[in-house]
Amino acid sequence: MNPAGTRQNIVPTPNVQEFFRDSLDAAIARQKLEADDHTVHYVVNLLVLYTRADELYDDGPDGRSLPPLATLFAAANEARSPRQRYVALRRLGDLALFMAGFFPDALARKPVDVDYYIRMGGTAYGTLASAAPATTRQRAFADVFRELAGKFGDFVEAIGEISDLSRRYTPRDILRLYERWLATGSERARQRLDELGVQLSPATASRASH
């Protein structure tokens, strides 16, 4: 699970689901993010699922690769049945959440950035939440998708904290983190810079907060 070649392996743990649950709970608490337990459980299961490359990548003419969000969006629009549309939108939302949380720096080097993933993912989840559910299972997920749509950026930040646990920062990584903090005012980025020993002047901090 290393699309960009920049991450170390996930911290070894005898129970991957327990690791993600504990880590996500801790990140949510630090961010003072209010989240329904069903939504947290959904995100944890998503993280566990995507630790497996066969779930993360799709088969294509050039081998296995990450599907572009635009491709998934097109598949949803061209779906021949409500189920096909549901599957495409859910895959879009899930993939956008995972990639924006775990690999923001890799996305910064692509034509589309993290904000694009947040917009696309939030829209996909919002569409799922507002659509008339075709099955009891879809009805049960409606509230989860609604919360993910409304707090997509917050969950990206929480997942990013988990990603930080397994990362070794190079000077270039630190520069990108600093640039992201300047552009977004991310509290997580600021805290990470502080942990890495980067001193931020009050004047710079004021600019990043606006």
Image: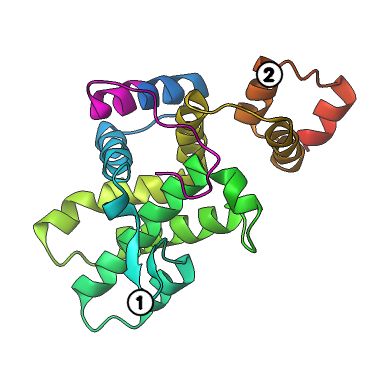
| Residue behind mark 1 | 75
What is the quadrant of the C terminus in the image? top right
Q: What residue type is labelled 1?
A: Ala
> Residue 39: x percent and y percent?
30, 39
> Residue 145: x percent and y percent?
32, 51
Q: State whether residue 133 is above or below residue 201.
A: below
**Residue found at the very far right of the displayed protein:** 203
Any magenta on residue 159? no
Q: Which amino acid does label 2 sit on?
A: Leu
Of residues 193 and 123, the one drawn nearer to the viewer in this rendering: 193
In the image, the segment drawn in magenta is 1-22
Any magenta on residue 8? yes
Q: State whether residue 81 is above or below residue 193.
A: below
Label 1, label 2: how far apart the Cα atoms are: 42 Å
Residue at 71%, 35% (x, y): give it. 181
What is the quadrant of the N terminus in the image? top left
**Residue found at the very far left of the displayed protein:** 136
| Residue behind mark 2 | 196
Q: Please identify the dominant SS of the magenta region.
A: loop
Residue 91: which quarter of the image? bottom left
